[in-house]
Image (cartoon, rainbow, N blue to C red):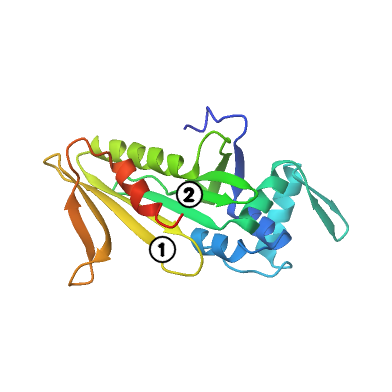
Amino acid sequence: MTAQKLPESAYRLTSHELLALLAFEKGAGTALTRRVLALADLPDHHDLVRAGVGTLNVRDTATVNGEQVALRGPAIYLARVFSTANLWFDITRVGPDAVAPIYIASSPAGRVVLFLRPLSEYVCLPLDEGTSTLEMVEATVNDAVAAAGERSGGIVTSRRYDGDSAPAVANIKMLKDGSIKLAAAPLDATGQLTVRDLGAGEQPGAAVRALLAVSA
């Protein structure tokens, strides 16, 4: 997905605007969203939160009337998703030319994919009803592995967050000889993730999906 060819349903959001949305509508998923996106828990009157409200107002996705702030359009949907999100995935390609993480949020209010851009800007893309969260995880992992493979190896990390527990992890490593390894729980005798080779015809995305779908 390029900045020049974004789907009409995509919406750009700065980290300041995210802070404003989280402060505006708090819910059971707010703490998890802050944890995954590494956002501080700031009071409503904090300068960064107020800056986010100002940006929302400029984008016409919030109205400000004195001390009263009301969200508009896509900001309403995103605030509800982030405040009720009970499941997050983080897929990141690691390497010298790696791109930023891709996040996938799932909540009773909807599902959103977030592409992190430079200058702490997120491109938020709602998932349509025909695509499951795990299908998006699988496709994203396969795309990241393909991109890393074209550059002579690399690592793609995948994490699943739900609740306060440590995230479930499934990492894919592409070696220069063309082989692909999967590292995931359980931990071995040294406390490291167990590593195995992917079998012939075994797709990285499907392998990661199966591991991260446990108790979904």
User: Percent position (x, y) of residue 49?
Assistant: 68, 61
Crowding near the residue tagged with mark 1, few <14, some 14–19, many ≥20 C-alpha atoms within 10 Å:
some
Query: For the point 72% across and 42% down, which residue is it?
Result: 59
Which residue position is annotated with label 2? 103
Q: Which of 95 and 187 is in front in this view?
A: 187
Q: Give the residue furthest to the top.
A: 5
Residue 175 image offset from top left, x and y in percent: 16, 45
Q: Mark 1 = which residue?
A: 167
Decide which of tag 2 and tag 1 comes sooner along the chain. Answer: 2
The local secondary structure at tag 1 comes to: loop
Q: In this view, does 72 lie to the left or right of 89?
A: right
Which quadrant of the structure image shows residue 139?
A: top left
The single residue placed furthest to the bottom in the displayed view is 190
Compared with 180, 165 (above or below) is below
- Amino acid type, callout 1: Pro
Q: Nearer the viewer, mark 2 or mark 1?
A: 1
Q: Which mark, residue 175?
A: none
Q: Which amino acid does label 2 sit on?
A: Tyr
Which residue is depicted at the point 53% across and 27% down? 5
Residue 39: in sight, yes or no?
A: no
The answer to which image quadrant residue 174 occupies is: top left
What whole-number distance in Å separates the C-alpha atoms at marks 2 and 1?
14 Å
Q: Nearer the viewer, residue 209 or 142?
A: 209
Callout 2–callout 1 Cβ contact below 8 Å: no
Q: Which residue is drawn at 33% across and 46% down?
A: 98
Residue at image coords 45%, 40%: 136
Res 178 visible: yes
Q: What is the x, y in percent for residue 112?
A: 56, 44
Which of 64 and 157 lies nearest the eye of the viewer?
A: 157
In the image, is 206 to the left or to the right of 4? left
